[in-house]
Amino acid sequence: MVAVRDTIRMYTRRPRPRRALTVIVAIAVVALLAACGGATAATPTPVTGTPIPGEVIELELTGALKIEQAGQQVASITVKKGETYTFRIKNTAGYDHDFHVATDEELKGGGHEHMAGVLPFSSGTKEFTYTFDADGPLAFGCTLPGHYSVMKGTFTIVP
Ligand SMILES: [Cu+2]
């Protein structure tokens, strides 16, 4: 009697592990397909020499020796560490300004042509990109003679 009951139990239980295995294999296959699909979608073809587009910081260099953002003089710009920004610098002065990103000491000194930024220009808009990969301190400003003392500001770099 016990033997028969065991046999019945064995018989009725038998398909369960196999069904469970089928489900596991099905899940694994779906997961694998999803992983493959996700991997191809998340890996765009890298384009050499093209900066990764980030947030745009629009600034205006004015004839009144001011650096303005949306019509307001700007003394500090908050940026995120590790982020790449596009600086869109518009000169409305009608005479030369430049714009560079470096430390305050570097901006006060010479050799600005080797620093990140745009070289002197007298009209129109110029762009450059900058990645804030260090903690700072970092400043910005126009380095032309007599301009930096009034045309400058600092970056607040947040994590
Ligand atoms: Cu200037």
Image: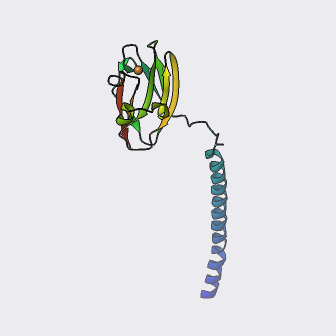
Q: In this view, does 70 lie above or below 83?
A: above
- Nearer the observer, 131 or 122: 122
| Horizontal side, residue 147 vs residue 114: left or right | left
Q: Is residue 123 above or below residue 148?
A: above
Q: Is residue 41 above or below residue 28?
A: above
| Horizontal side, residue 119 vs residue 153: left or right | right
Residue 85 in sight: no
Count of numbered circles on the image:
0
At 67% from the left and 77% from the top, the residue drawn is: 11
Residue 64 in sight: yes
Q: Which colour scheme is used?
A: rainbow
| Horizontal side, residue 31 vs residue 121: left or right | right
| Quadrant in the picture for the C terminus | top left
Q: Is residue 110 above or below residue 120?
A: below
Measuring from the top left, give residue 41's x and y in whole percent.
64, 45
Question: Residue 152 occupies which quadrant of the picture?
Answer: top left
- Nearer the observer, 88 or 123: 123
- Nearer the observer, 20 or 50: 50
At 44% from the left and 40% from the top, the residue drawn is: 132
Measuring from the top left, give residue 44's x and y in whole percent.
64, 43
| Quadrant in the picture for the N terminus | bottom right
Measuring from the top left, give residue 35's x and y in whole percent.
63, 53
Which quadrant does ligand 1 occupy? top left
At 51% from the left and 20% from the top, the residue drawn is: 125
Question: Residue 47 occupies which quadrant of the picture?
Answer: top right
